[in-house]
Image: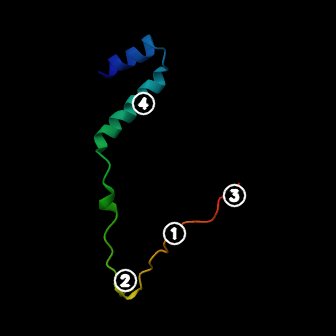
Amino acid sequence: MEQGLVAFLVNENGFNHDRVVKATEKIKAAKDKGSQGRMESFFKPVINTSEPLKRKDAAGKATKVPPTKKSKTGAKKK
């Protein structure tokens, strides 16, 4: 397989032989390593020992009623 790839790239398409061989070696080494781990395995959950922040009670706030728009009933300017 490797020899056919090198022959195709070097002889038929004009690639540099040394670069093709080196690239195939890198691909072989990467194939043996396995896949990349998930981010969840890197980041561990942290236990927070301090007191949690409490939010202000939303019911205690007075709700604002937006002002109603008044229509302009003035005379039109000419």
Q: Is residue 59 above or below residue 33?
A: below
CA–CA distance in space, label 3 to label 1: 21 Å
Nearest-to-viewer mark from 4 and 1:
1
Q: Quadrant of residue 58?
A: bottom left
Q: Quadrant of residue 26?
A: top left
* Most foreground residue, 60 or 4: 60
Q: Position of residue 16 (x, y in %)?
A: 49, 20
**Residue annotated with mark 4:** 23
Give the residue type that dot 1 points to.
Lys
Q: Is residue 13 above or below residue 27?
A: above
Nearest-to-viewer mark from 3 and 1:
3
Give the residue type that dot 2 points to.
Ala
CA–CA distance in space, label 2 to label 3: 47 Å
Nearest-to-viewer mark from 2 and 3:
3
**Mark closest to the chain's N terminus, 3 or 1:** 1
Q: Quadrant of residue 27?
A: top left
Q: Residues within 10 Å of mark 1 (few under 14, many from 20)?
A: few
**Mark closest to the chain's N terminus, 2 or 3:** 2
Looking at the rendered structure, which numbered label has been put on residue 58? 2
**Residue annotated with mark 1:** 69
Q: Is residue 5 above or below residue 52?
A: above
Give the residue type that dot 3 points to.
Lys
9 left or right of 33 in image? right
Q: Secondary structure at mark 3?
A: loop
Nearest-to-viewer mark from 4 and 2:
2
Q: Residues within 10 Å of mark 2 (few under 14, many from 20)?
A: few
Residue drawn at 42 percent across, 26 percent down: 21
